[in-house]
Amino acid sequence: MRNITTKQLWAALLTAAALFSMTGCTALGDTATTSYTESTIGIVETTEEYVSQTDYLYIKNEDGTIAISGYTGSDTVVNVPDTVDGLKVTAIGDHAFEANWDIEQVVLPEGITYIGESAFMDCGSLTSVNVPESTDTIRRAAFAGCSAIAEISVPANVSVIMEEAFSGCGSLTSLTITNSEVSYANWGLDAEVMPDLTITCPDGSLTASWAKDNGFKTKSLS
């Protein structure tokens, strides 16, 4: 059964209102805004959350692109579009998909540069999600509690992975870190809890050194 949050209930009611009025995209009032931390200052223009005749809520970025801030649909396989209401999607905002237990697979489009804090946290049925080549930042606890996911590949453009990003990912057996300069920052990896995890990374990289020092199996990225 779907876990409906207060945010999603508001979204459903406002979507219905939008459909009834046929006015297209509408900005929500102060009672349904997304709280952004200091980590997002300079990324978003406003905390006003918009709802359109789609399954997505979003917040506008300073450059006219948008960050997905919520999902109100019921699909188990979610293909995030590269545009919503004609606006380019460049980020998955903080808590956007958090605690959505129905989702089993997420496909993110190229053009995503930022995966926000707790974006997919506690998506306990999620078994597959891609990190687009365009992504440069994975924020705190982005995939924390994704207990069913077995494989995550982080492309070379990602230069920042913040703490607890993979905490609670007990089924994780394959983690690829492509950028040799990415430094471990308490990502939530534990060799005792994840004995089958293999970390694939460049020889001599910061991640390789950390993984070997902490008892993880490693594989050279060819």
Image (spheres, rainbow, N blue to C red):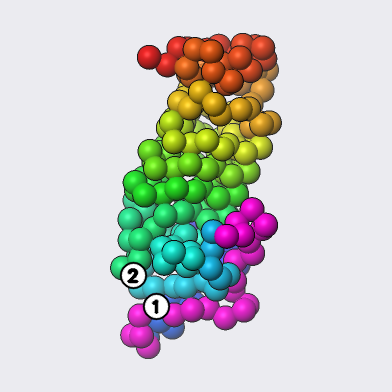
Q: Residue 87 appears in which quarter of the rendering?
A: bottom left
The range drawn in magenta is 21-42
Q: Position of residue 85 (x, y in %)?
A: 33, 70
Q: Is residue 73 above or below residue 152?
A: below
**Residue depicted at x 49% and y 33%:** 149
Image quadrant containing the C terminus: top left
Depth check: give the residue in front, 204 or 89. Answer: 204
Q: Position of residue 209 (x, y in %)?
A: 61, 14
| 153 sits to left or right of 196 | left
Q: Say the numbered circle drawn on residue 25.
A: 1
For badge 2, the amino acid type reads Asp
Q: What kind of element bears circle 2? A: loop
Disc 2 and disc 1 in contact, CB within 8 angstroms: yes
Number of residues whose C-alpha sits closer than 10 Å to that of mark 1, classed few (under 14), some (14–19) or many (20 or more): some
Q: What kind of element bears circle 1? A: loop
Q: Is residue 197 above or below residue 144?
A: above
Q: Say the numbered circle drawn on residue 85.
A: 2
**Residue depicted at x 52% and y 56%:** 93
Which residue is at the far bottom?
A: 21
Number of residues whose C-alpha sits closer than 10 Å to that of mark 2, classed few (under 14), some (14–19) or many (20 or more): some
Q: Residue 141 appears in which quarter of the rendering?
A: top right
For badge 1, the amino acid type reads Cys
